[in-house]
Amino acid sequence: MSIDRKRQIIEAAAKSFSLFGYKATTMEQIAKLANVGKGTIYTFFKNKEDLLDAIISSLILEIIEEAEQAMDPDRPFSENAHRALYRILEFRQQHQLTAKLLQEVRNLGTPAVQEVMKKLDLAIIDYIRKKINIAIKKGEIRDCDAEITAFLMLKTYIALIVDWEKDHEPLTKEEIAQLFELYFLKGLSK
């Protein structure tokens, strides 16, 4: 029963954050959406920040699952890196909650939201780092600092997908893969 209430609260908070943003959401709104008393929320979560953190932790698992599904163990690292990174960013842009939180960071700079988005990026970088280390061990790419490489891979994809589109025609998935390989992976390939 308490697990169901906790899940109700998390779902209600995610819905409210998605619609109104983190800053504009109140615990009263969440309680109303979850059909629980405001005090019930505090039996599971210390505050709104704690609730947002729980939602982001769950979202990180979803994003990693999306990346795993995008990869094919029979394909080389370079292809799987593209497939996973593209899917991660596609998920972030299409998922209503992450889209709203990214908008709030850009427009309002809400510290709690900046912190959870940083947590999200660090989790993605850590995931990519692990995949890079596996590729190094398999001899698919040269030895390198996996954490820096993961960071650069993520930021390159963000630049090609998000930043480029601000002033230019969007690149196709194939163009992004070609550019990523040309500018980034060719330097790592043996």
Image (tube, rainbow, N blue to C red):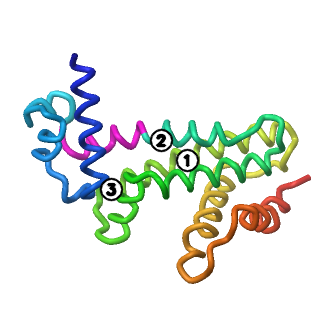
Would residue 188 be found to the left or right of residue 172 on screen?
right
Q: How many marks?
A: 3
Query: In front: 118, or 160?
Result: 160
Asked if marks 3 and 1 touch (Cβ < 8 Å), the reply is no
> Distance from label 2 to label 3 (Cα)?
15 Å
Residue occupying the point 57% across, 75% down: 165
Q: Amino acid at mark 1?
A: Ile
- Percent x, y of residue 100: 36, 59
- Percent x, y of residue 112: 29, 54
Q: Amino acid at mark 2?
A: Ile
Q: Is residue 49 magenta?
A: yes
Mark 2 — residue?
A: 60
Mark 1 — residue?
A: 124
- Percent x, y of residue 161: 60, 67
Q: Place residue 175 in its image quadrant.
A: bottom right
Mark 3 — residue?
A: 113
First to last magenta residue range: 46-58
Residue occupying the point 39% across, 43% down: 56
Residue occupying the point 79% across, 50% down: 79
